[in-house]
Amino acid sequence: MTTVQDLPNRQITPRPVRFARAREFLRTHRSLSVIVGMALFAAALPVIVLLPPFSGFSGQAVWLDGFTIAGIYVLLALGLNIVVGLSGLLDLGYAAFFAIGSYTFAFAAAPFTHNDFPFWPMLLVGAVMAAVFGVLLGAPTLRLRGDYLAIVTLGFGEIVPIVFLNASKYTDGPNGIGGISPPKVLDYIFPTTGNPWPYYLVMAGLIAFSMILIYRLEESRLGRAWMAIREDELAAASNGVNTVTTKLLAFALGASTAGLAGVFSASKLTLVSPNLFRFDVSFTVLAMVVLGGMGNTWGVAVGAFVIFMIQNVVLKQLNLFFDSVQVPILSDINFIQYQFLLYGIALVAMMLLRPEGLFPSRRRRRELHTEEDPSFAESGDPLGAAPE
Amino acid sequence: MSGPAGTSDGAGPEIVEAEIVVAEAVVVREATAPEAGPAQGEALLRARSVTKRFGGLVAVRDVNLDIPPRAIVSIIGPNGAGKTTFFNVVAGILDPTSGSVEFAGRTMVARPRRTWLEPILWMLPAVLVLVVAFLLGVQSRTEAEVLVTAAVALGTLVFTLLLAIVRPSWYQTLLARYLGVLRSARPNDMVAAGIGRTFQNIRLFQNMTALENVLVGMHLKLRSNLIDHLLSTRRQRQEEDVAARRASELLRLVGLRGRENEVARNLPYGDQRRLELARALGNDPALLLLDEPTAGMNPAETAQMTQLIGRLRRDLGVSVLLIEHDMRVVMGISDHILVMDHGERISEGTPDHVRRDPKVIEAYLGAAPT
């Protein structure tokens, strides 16, 4: 025993961690900190929009409505982060699960189908339905990797809205299903227009709930298995990780979050139609995950929120803003027309300047910034690469 | 067969105190350890006429190998001799073209797997029900009937998917034994049976810490399920604590004390090899497959690794199947050596026997001029 341990140990001095104790507390009381953080965030946002620069654009109710819709995207990004960020499976058809969740609730609670199931249990049903289809998509893609997986998921993402479009007997085709009933608590029916608070608070609750569960998954042996598959699938299998079920679970759990988001969005918009679930939704959510910081749950959530706000609010307000200050050339530009151009430029800049995303996970930063690592700078990569 | 305490009597204390300098003496002692001799008892691993073809190339032809419990068996041979291919067959990564691998009395790998069939087979019952339900639904007129058929179909689908995730053994037995498909172990099935392995080119989870690497290796030892994960139950937390302690123990065993929280990629080369070994030990294997464990190490590190392998056998009672190029390691530590060249067995036996075999010398050095 002694000989092996008495090696000349090259001590690597650890980088000092700021707020080490606070971080430790957050790590050990994860659920509590998510709830408190989410509560603070949800309480701060309505106050912030009352302050000068924001209050000039629109009233608090409009802002809160926007935040609620942003919350749908936050949920989607959180779910996709399980598949792409944690397990490393590129999924380009994620909007399909969103669509399945939405249509599940539309079938269950709309005049079109003469059903009126309550909202709250349907949240669970929508999540389960999406999870089932997640496994259905996952099963044939188990043997595929990287690019090939992406193409198959892309195909799935195209198929689902088209099925909803063409099965017009059941879905009313391109018109979609309208008049979906809002949630009810006891006798109180959520107002779909006017008072935005009920939906806003439910959304905050849903996000906190999902984040807690995702953090728990991440820190369990399942989360470790996901990371192992992302790092090296063959090595993971050779260490006893059942890659088939682990990947299927990633697809299923990722999809179930989209199902939640779908049920909520159907009820919030009181309408589902196939063109709400086109490829650009999948793409936007993927961009949110990448820009937010793949693999870092709260980073992805914040990233999704910020990007949604930029894309859907800030660019619109730019018009208003430049109109009001009368800048000669800028006020003639319709920024909404150019939103994808600006968005694309932002993506390119981001990938060049900060490839690991706004709020990268520890691991991701390690992957992309080896040269900053003290031990790497000293001795190079253990596999022989020289320090750059 | 003597127990672990008995075997360590003679060689034990000296190995513990041995310095790097006298490692060679240790190696010699290991070879003469009393429990040597593959003939004892039932074989742990039994490979029967394993053949593997890649297109026209026969990488492994008709190789038989028995590994008794607590033995160290080596495979040597020039580059391209088919050692690693054979290894991968045993580890369940490749399927043999013909032949079989038995482990602890069970046939693990028998015929080429048909992986493309697998999803289809799992989905088959559900799809059948869906088709029937669809046909019924088309005929029925009333709304209620359609709803009921749809519910039944979806229910079956969900049920089958859950089955596919849980993977009940009866369905697998049905497929494997009675329908004759899927009679082949995947790598994780081999791990579950008790085989751990390392890789020739280190395949650690580079961005995870040393402790996390070992915890992944202990994946099958942990029993918490999805419900535990989601609720973060006391059972899971306790299990994780125990697992983390066990993982640190394993790290200490291979000589990585105090490196738990270091990222795998930052470890020096020799430590990475050791970490990979600790990871393979995480599942308490009965058989360790080590693919060139001392490749790229300096003589001192090689001696340590050799010692470590001997100690694993002595303390943990594992068998070891070793691929190695360093003859000092092989000759010193092995009970039994299999020599391969061009995919075929050219010699087999004790180190002394193999060392003198003219065929082996020819394979390594070329034929002597006559």
Image (cartoon, helix red, strand yellow):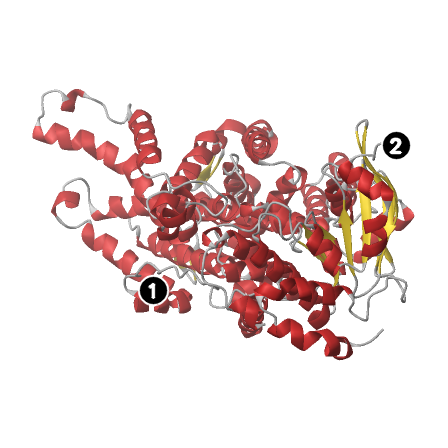
User: Which residue is rendered at x = 66% and y = 49% of the image?
Assistant: B292
Residue B128, by quadrant, is top right
Q: Quadrant of the N terminus of chain A?
A: bottom right
Residue B225: image location, x then y, percent: 62, 63
Q: Which mark is residue A23?
A: 1
Q: Nearer the viewer, residue B260 or A360?
A: B260
Chain of residue at mark 1 = A
B188 versus A349 height, above or below:
below
Position of residue B132 in the picture relative to residue A120 (left or right):
right
Mark 2 belongs to which amino acid?
Thr
Quadrant of the image containing the C terminus of chain A? top left
Residue at 11% x, 46% y: name it. Answer: A52
Q: Position of residue A171 (x, y in %)?
A: 56, 34
Q: Nearer the viewer, residue A129 or B20?
A: B20
Question: How many numbered callouts?
Answer: 2
Amino acid at pointer 1: Arg
Instruction: Spot the residue most to the front.
Output: B370
For label 2, the crowd category at 10 Å Cα-Cα, with few meaning under 14, some 14 to 19 and many 20 or more, is few
**Residue with the mark numbered 2:** B370
Residue B362 on image: x %, y %: 82, 38
Residue count near mark 1 (Cα–Cα under 10 Å), binned few <14, some 14–19, many ≥20: few
**Quick check: A197 left or right of A285?**
left
Give the Cα distance between marks 1 and 2: 75 Å
Determine whether the residue tagged by mark 2 lies in a helix, strand or loop. loop
- The image quadrant that residue A293 belongs to is top left
Q: Which of these two is toward me, B173 or A307?
A: B173
Is residue B159 visible to us here? no
Residue B31 visible from this viewpoint: yes
